[in-house]
Image (cartoon, rainbow, N blue to C red):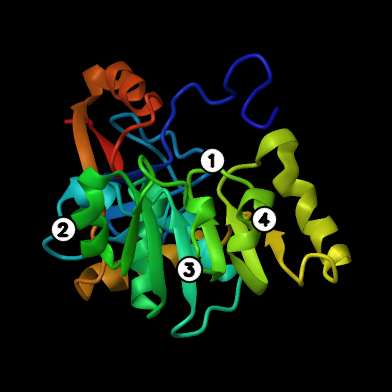
Amino acid sequence: MITGLFKPKKQTPGTEFAGEIEVIGNNVNSLKVGDKVFGFNDDGAQSHAQFLAINQDYVAIMPENLSYTQAAASTEGTHYAYNFINKIKLEKGQSVLVNGATGAIGSAAVQLLSYFEIKITATSAIKNTELVKSLGADRVIDYTQEDFTKDDQSYHYVFDTVGKSSFFKCKKLLKPGGIYISSDLGFLWQNIYLPLITPMLKAVLENKKTVTPFPKDIPATLTLVKKLIEQGKFKAVIDREYPLEQIIDAYRYVEKGHKTGNVVIRVK
């Protein structure tokens, strides 16, 4: 209903991008023609195209020595991961379990949590164990061999960055007062109404609850990710790159659900 009941409201897909400014509007004061920029708009930037028009609030100057490929993959997953963090009160030394640490959101979440000095346990296929550790995870659970919901450790927060679990499956992983956050609406859209219900059951649930990380404040995300890239503390994980002419193949690959990090469309 949001994107179009019978067909997409916007026929050109794409939310994040990197490129060079060709033209600016009369009221644009933070950018100029020729600037190399990157950005994101989750309402639909229509970026899978040669040109796009977008509000300057959703655009930032690219860090120096960063490729367009890296820049283009640095914003969407980071924005959603950062909004997980914005919904809670992280404190240095707390523990977080990240389910789906090799996805676009998960790989960004691990790097952000590492930046905030959080103890990180992450789930991943064994082939990506070293990658996930290099992003900042302290411990990795091979989800192909173990059910992470049966882990014997407890956490202040559980981030399900692939939306393949639920609050009730993960409840026993949470410390008293712990919070579960998912990137997905969940079965029967439960992650919409559970944030309203779980606080009313705090005595039964040991004050454990779930919150819904509706994303907001894209400029804040762009500011943070640019700073971290410049400090060498963030690098987008990229699986594959396709030319625009093969965008259908790119979507088919992503829909298999086995990508590592991001898939990038190269326009030219």
Of pointers 3 and 2, the one earlier in the residue sequence: 2
Say what secondary structure mark 4 lies in: loop
Q: Place residue 36 in its image quadrant.
A: bottom left
Of pointers 4 and 1, the one earlier in the residue sequence: 1
Residue in the picture at 48% in, 50% down: 161
The quadrant the N terminus occupies is: top right
Q: How far apart are marks 1 and 2 (CA)?
A: 33 Å
Residue in the picture at 76% in, 71% down: 206
Residue in the picture at 41% in, 48% down: 100
Q: Which amino acid does label 2 sit on?
A: Leu
**Residue 33 visible in rendering:** no
Q: What residue type is labelled 3?
A: Val
- For label 2, the crowd category at 10 Å Cα-Cα, with few meaning under 14, some 14 to 19 and many 20 or more, is some
Which of discs 4 and 3 lies nearer the camera? The answer is: 3
Question: In the rendered image, which residue does mark 1 sit on?
Answer: 164
Question: In the rendered image, which residue does mark 4 sit on?
Answer: 212
Question: In the rendered image, which residue does mark 2 sit on?
Answer: 66
User: Viewed as shown, does residue 92 lie left or right of 196?
Assistant: left
Q: How far apart are marks 1 and 3 (CA)?
A: 17 Å
Of pointers 4 and 3, the one earlier in the residue sequence: 3
Kindly check if marks 4 and 1 are in contact, taking CB atoms under 8 A apart as contact: no
